[in-house]
Amino acid sequence: MDTVMSQLTGAGDGSRFKDAAEILENGGLVAFPTETVYGLGADATNEKAVRDIYRAKGRPSDNPLIVHIGTAGELERYAAEVPEAAWKCAEAFWPGPLTIIVRAKPGVFAPSVTAGLDTVGLRMPAHPAALGLLQASGLPVAAPSANTSGKPSPTRAEHVAADMGGKIPYILDGGPTGIGIESTVLDLTSVPPAILRPGAVTSDMLRPVIGEVNHSAEATDAGKATPRAPGMKYTHYSPDAPVWLIDPDREQILDAVRRIHGKGKRIALVAPEGFGETGADWYFPTGRQNDPASVSGQLYASLRACDGTDADIVLAATVNDEGIGGAVMNRLNKAAAGRLFRT
Ligand code: TXA
Ligand code: MG
């Protein structure tokens, strides 16, 4: 299959959204930018199209998809009942990087969207291209991140093309996404609501709007090993070489580089600007120290860039966990499977 990459320019985008909407209406897949990461979209009411998403990504079929909507009012159309907290979240954070889990209206979505659950994740994204596509089609659009399963989510159209080229007909290229890590997933079916996946909308932001919120660390049901967001049990966000976390401290990095080189291994360093000349074989400057939002915007591009090297090991600098930093550390810990390099 030929993949068309359509660059959004502002002028004339309406006809690009129409083309893309037509593909969705005909059961095809379209990748599109959101403010978090690129999504791989299909008509959420079309079972065959939704299955094609799983196939294109190589995604396990027990991991449900997020449904994207173009207006907050659609909550009523897709949720069995809309809890008060859902309206409050929509009012405060939509369009934006927050996915809310509610009971799904029975019989609306293709069964594969929810992977057999009676709940559905809904999100109204804050990106003109995503909204343009959603509003042009009027469809609920099931869209996981547009990466091959197990790879970092795509934050640029080139990442999508690298993973999905030849497998899908159409990519809307809106340039780099801003936030760079996936939306917060908030389960509103539990009491109190629980963050199943941390993101740019933090518990500190949610609490004033909906009251008590459980932290992501508590998002596994007590006594059970299975996380409530099925996707969180899979290794995610990993480059090919093993990742080790390290403090963003020049002395520690210099020491780590010496020791790893001593074992004849090559190193890719993912660290904030200003960590050049450490002797690492590759260095991908990733945001600014003490500015977690700048790191989140570039993290996945840097982890992907590591795959373009012959590094045997990736050293990735930690960030302080204020604001979106907590979500960045969640992704880094996953990429590193918790490994921390200490000297
Ligand atoms: O920022 C984002 O959320 C991006 C963009 C494209 O919107 N999408 C995204 O989708 O990251 P995906 O499929 O890669 O991640 C969805 C996460 C998974 O961890 C999944 O298990 C969880 O949300 N999830 C989806 N529906 C759920 C449900 N009904 N109950 C619990 N968890 C659910
Ligand atoms: Mg994903």
Image (tube, rainbow, N blue to C red):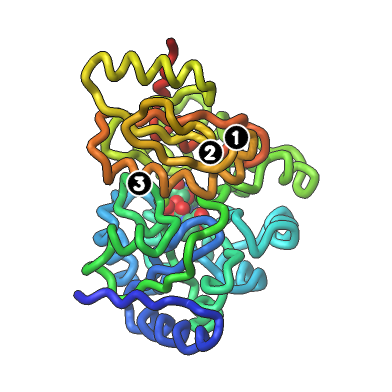
The residue mark sitting in front, 2 or 1, is: 2
The tag on residue 273 is: 2
Circle 1 packing at 10 Å, graded few (<14), some (14-19), many (20+), is some
Secondary structure of the residue carrying numbered label 1? loop
Residue at (53, 65) in percent of width and height: 105
Q: Is residue 110 above or below residue 132?
A: above
Circle 2 packing at 10 Å, graded few (<14), some (14-19), many (20+), is some
Q: Nearer the viewer, residue 267 or 43?
A: 267
Which of the two labelled residues, at mark 1 and mark 3, occupies the earlier sequence position? 1
Q: Is residue 120 visible?
A: no
The tag on residue 137 is: none
For the residues labelled 2 and 3, the Cα–Cα distance comes to 17 Å
Q: Is residue 342 above or below residue 115?
A: above
Residue at (49, 48) in percent of width and height: 298
For the residues labelled 1 and 3, the Cα–Cα distance comes to 20 Å
Circle 3 residue = 304
Q: Amino acid at mark 1?
A: Gln
Circle 1 residue = 289
Q: Is residue 195 above or below residue 14?
A: above
Q: Nearer the viewer, residue 291 or 116?
A: 291
> In this rendering, would 86 be left or right of 107?
right
The residue mark sitting in front, 1 or 3, is: 1
Residue at (34, 33) in percent of width and height: 268
